[in-house]
Amino acid sequence: MPNALALTIRVAVVAVALWVATALITGIELGGGTTAGRAGTLIVVAIIFGLVNAVLKPIIKVVGCPLYILTLGLVGLVVNALLFMLVGYLSTRLGLPFHVDGFWAGFWGAIIVAVVAFVLHLIIPDRFDQR
């Protein structure tokens, strides 16, 4: 049961972070008519975001290890932007009203999601978010 609670909290944190990104970045669009529809979209997109990061990011880090070393990790910003754009693409393909318009929207969106999620994880007590 604690794992289910931790997973639920992580998804909720990413959903809130995605909402903040949609509010701050003009190239990230969240459609949907009602507030409940938008919240549901954000939750599904947060799950997609988690799956993409869990599956692809480790593979990219291993394959791109020389680039990470050569650029002192700055290529990670580009990778995060591209993964964020992939989440937008997959969401659109699945019929979700979430769209990322271009590299720079993905770049800034990924940074905002990372910072907001970090701050929220600092606020949430560790007993609820056990990693």
Image: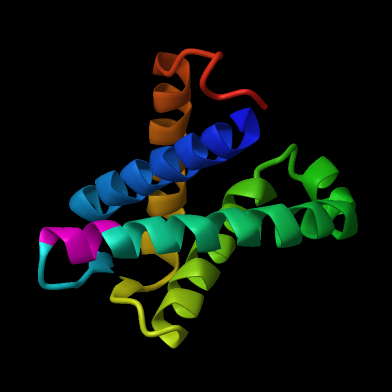
The C terminus sits in image quarter: top right
**Side (left or right) of 93 relative to 28:** right
Query: Where 94 sits versus 118, above or below?
Result: below
Residue found at x 87% / y 50%: 65
Magenta stretch: dominant SS? Answer: helix
Check the image and name the residue furthest to the left. 34
Tally of marks: 0
Query: Where 98 sits versus 73, above or below?
Result: below
Instruction: State the residue in front, 126 or 91.
Output: 126
Percent of width and height locating residue 36: 18, 60
Residue found at x 88% / y 53%: 62
Find residue 104 and report its image quarter: bottom left
Check the image and name the residue furthest to the front. 1
Q: Is residue 81 visible?
A: no
Magenta residues span: 35-39
Instruction: State the residue in front, 94 or 65.
Output: 94
**Side (left or right) of 89 relative to 22:** right
Percent of width and height locating residue 107: 45, 55
The N terminus sits in image quarter: top right
Percent of width and height locating residue 47: 51, 58
What colour scheme governs how the chains and residues are painted in the rendered image of this protein?
rainbow
Q: Is residue 42 magenta?
A: no
**Side (left or right) of 78 relative to 60:** left
Residue found at x 47% / y 45%: 11
Find residue 80 and report its image quarter: bottom right
Q: Is residue 24 visible?
A: yes
Residue found at x 53% / y 63%: 48
**Side (left or right) of 61 relative to 35:** right
Percent of width and height locating residue 110: 46, 50
